[in-house]
Image (cartoon, coloured by chain):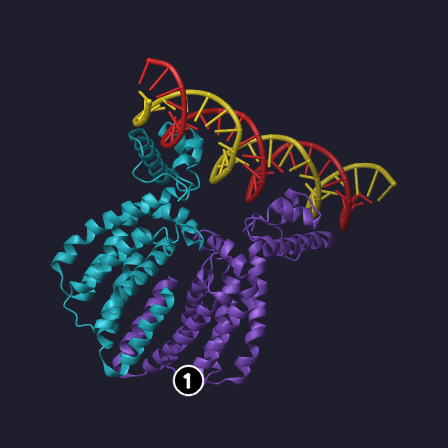
Chain colours: A purple, B cyan, C red, D yellow
Amino acid sequence: MTDVAEAGRTPRAEQTRVAITEAALELFRERGYEAATMRAIAERAGVSTGNAYYYFSSKEELIQEFYVRNHARHLAACRDVLAAEADLSARLRGTVRALIDVSAPYHAFAATFYKHAAEPASPLSPFSAQSSPVRDAAIATYREVVEGSSARIGPDLRDRLPELLWLYSMGIILYWVHDTSPGCARTYRLIDMTVPIAGRLVAAARIPVLRATARDITAILDELRG
Amino acid sequence: MTDVAEAGRTPRAEQTRVAITEAALELFRERGYEAATMRAIAERAGVSTGNAYYYFSSKEELIQEFYVRNHARHLAACRDVLAAEADLSARLRGTVRALIDVSAPYHAFAATFYKHAAEPASPLSPFSAQSSPVRDAAIATYREVVEGSSARIGPDLRDRLPELLWLYSMGIILYWVHDTSPGCARTYRLIDMTVPIAGRLVAAARIPVLRATARDITAILDELRG
DNA sequence: GAGCAAACTTGAACATGTTCAAGATTGTTT
DNA sequence: AAACAATCTTGAACATGTTCAAGTTTGCTC
């Protein structure tokens, strides 16, 4: 926490912070991450270059705003399907497709900044401490996917499934970032092909033969979490 | 292909290229990726800064050398286990553990350059065209893991399994890069926990009930490949 | 070996992310 | 309202990846 609190300590500070954020997100979309220089962002925001660093300790930190807003759009986009569907596979499919839907306008941008999110030490990493609020919010969404479904799931798997599904969505995002097919059609097809398997695996976890494997997988999740 | 062919067109060129490569890998290990500046690399190699760019079109391209050498070390490290073991799980476990073994000295370095490998457009991406020689070599290693085993595998799965196992090893690497546990013990535990599941899934693919799922998964691989 | 083209090398110059000492503004205390 | 501290802002300066026009070396042809 080297930077200023998000609320802003002064009305003017809040105003400046918002101006910088808006300018950054505009330029990111217009030019991509690298080409949106800090000088250009500051200029469009009407402040000096150094001033941007008073509010954001690095250029990467400007992307956290993108994360927050994108998750909000995702929530809105999957509300309908989560209200209407009861089948687990249908709920998962709708939720993940909604994620790709709302992210689509930022596909080019995502390809240019993704490298910064992949760095382990980066605050942009989906596994980083700085990302945990938005990560927890995302996992909560998948908890709703599970809880609101009619699927019969053992209590232990039920606990871990939201996290597993979030990991699954991260994998889809990983593919999406690399996907150059028109309209990212391949990503949608990948979703449609993998979701039924996930659904079948969840169902199979109740079969005695696979019960042990299911337990192993939840144990691995505990391992992953540390 | 904007740069000079790898063999070098002149003895002197070859000598310079090697000097730059050696200096780069040394400095990468000593200081990490960011801190090993192109000026420092050129200086240690005894050439000018601009000369490094005559041989490598970017700093990132210097890492391809690391890939090649690391794969060679990996091959040597898993030769014994592949010669001795017949059980598929044991072969896979030994091969992936060997990958982590040989990569261990570069763990700190990997964390500092990993971001550049994650960028979709980067030639360092494991999915990029530039990486395909070393990727194909890696997949060939997992083909040997499969072919040399006593496991009974249907012909269709047998074809795709090497690629699947390579993807699996990429997932392990992804975890390893983020792993901060002493000696990366967590990564080894993750391998030990996941390998039996992979083995069990391969065996289960022969059960009629799961035959369809196995077919789906191979179809997905075709989708992934495009 | 003189001439020449290709291969190779140089170092200054440029753009960008980031830092920082100094200045300007704002709110509070006396 | 004067003094003062906290907050906010500035723009020059620095380090680094990268480019490029110009120079040097090498090997080949006649």
Closest to the observer, A51 or C14: C14
Label 1, residues with CA under 10 Å away: few <14, some 14-19, many ≥20: some
Relative horizontal placement of residue A213, taking residue D15 as reference (left or right): left
Q: Which amino acid does label 1 sit on?
A: Ala
| Corner quadrant of residue B7 | top left
Residue B68 percent coordinates (x, y): 29, 46
Residue B165 percent coordinates (x, y): 28, 63
Instruction: Tell me if residue B180 can be seen.
Output: no
Residue at 43% of width from left, 64% of height from top? A175
Closest to the observer, D23 or A94: D23
Residue at 35% of width from left, 46% of height from top? B64
Seen from this angle, which residue lies furthest left?
B84
Relative horizontal placement of residue B85, taking residue A61 as reference (left or right): left
Residue A9 percent coordinates (x, y): 69, 53
Q: Where B122 sits versus A212, above or below? A: above
Residue C8 percent coordinates (x, y): 37, 29
| Corner quadrant of residue D13 | top right
Relative horizontal placement of residue B192, taking residue B44 as reference (left or right): left
For the C terminus of chain A, the quadrant is bottom left
Closest to the observer, B39 or A160: B39
Chain assignment, label 1: A
Q: Where B22 sits versus B191, above or below? A: above
Relative horizontal placement of residue A201, taking residue A22 as reference (left or right): left
Closest to the observer, A154 or A67: A67
Q: Which residue is labeled 1 in the image?
A: A151
Q: What element carries label 1?
A: loop
- Total label count? 1
Instruction: Tell me if residue B39 can be seen.
Output: yes
